[in-house]
Amino acid sequence: MLKGKCLCGAVTYQYNAAIQQSILCFCTDCKKAQGAVFGWNSPIQQSEFQLLSGQSVLKEYFHTENKARVFCMQCGSPIYSYRTDLPSILRLRLGTVTSGRIPAPSELAYRESQPDFMCIDTEML
Ligand SMILES: [Zn+2]
Ligand SMILES: [Zn+2]
């Protein structure tokens, strides 16, 4: 089991299963959406994801037609994204996780956009 919350604490959630896989994504959309050097996320089952509080402050932004990026509109923390054609899978933003086990990334996406200064020990993956 996993728990998490946004920066201001309005949004809290738990995930009632284990995280199988985590991904670092260096694409330019993730960089902008996270304001960070990569997005760190994990595909999870929507059916096991339980929002404990904050429904009224969750906002969905569609940068592309079929992909919603869901964030806290009070503090801006990205919580998850999902595709409208695949609503049973959420992509959880792992920076919001406060307890529970997250496996080391098994995939690095869009590495061509990885900054030169950043060295990742792929032996660890
Ligand atoms: Zn918040
Ligand atoms: Zn990305």
Image (spheres, rainbow, N blue to C red):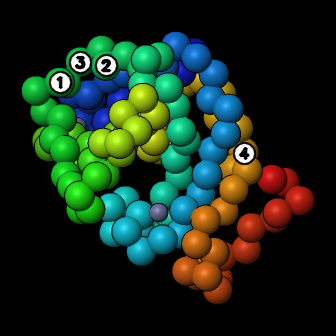
> What's the distance in space between the residues labelled 3 and 4, CA to CA?
28 Å
Per the rendering, the mark at residue 63 is none
Of badges 1 and 3, the one in the foreground is: 1
Label 4: few (<14), some or many (≥20) within 10 Å?
few
Where is 114 relative to 81, above or below?
Answer: below
**Could you tell me the amino acid type at mark 1?**
Gln
Label 3: few (<14), some or many (≥20) within 10 Å?
some
Q: Which residue is mark 4?
A: 104
Q: Which residue is mark 3?
A: 53
**Could you tell me the amino acid type at mark 3?**
Ser
For marks 4 and 2 on the same chain, the one whose residue lies earlier in the sequence:
2
Label 1: few (<14), some or many (≥20) within 10 Å?
few
**Disc 2 element:** strand
- Residue 97 at what x, y percent from top left? 48, 33
> What's the distance in space between the residues labelled 1 and 2, CA to CA?
7 Å
> What's the distance in space between the residues labelled 1 and 3, CA to CA?
6 Å
Asked whether the beta carbons under mark 3 and mark 2 sit within 8 Å of each other, the answer is yes
- Residue 106 at what x, y percent from top left? 73, 50
- Asked whether residue 63 appears in the rendered view, the answer is yes
> Residue 93: which quarter of the image?
top left
Where is 120 relative to 18, above or below?
Answer: below
Asked whether the beta carbons under mark 1 and mark 3 sit within 8 Å of each other, the answer is yes
The image quadrant where one finds ligand 1 is top left
Where is 44 relative to 48, above or below?
Answer: below
Q: Is residue 25 left or right of residue 86?
A: right
Per the rendering, the mark at residue 51 is 2
Q: Which residue is mark 1?
A: 55
Asked whether the beta carbons under mark 1 and mark 2 sit within 8 Å of each other, the answer is yes
In the rendered image, the residue lying farthest to the left is 56
In the rendered image, the residue lying farthest to the bottom is 116
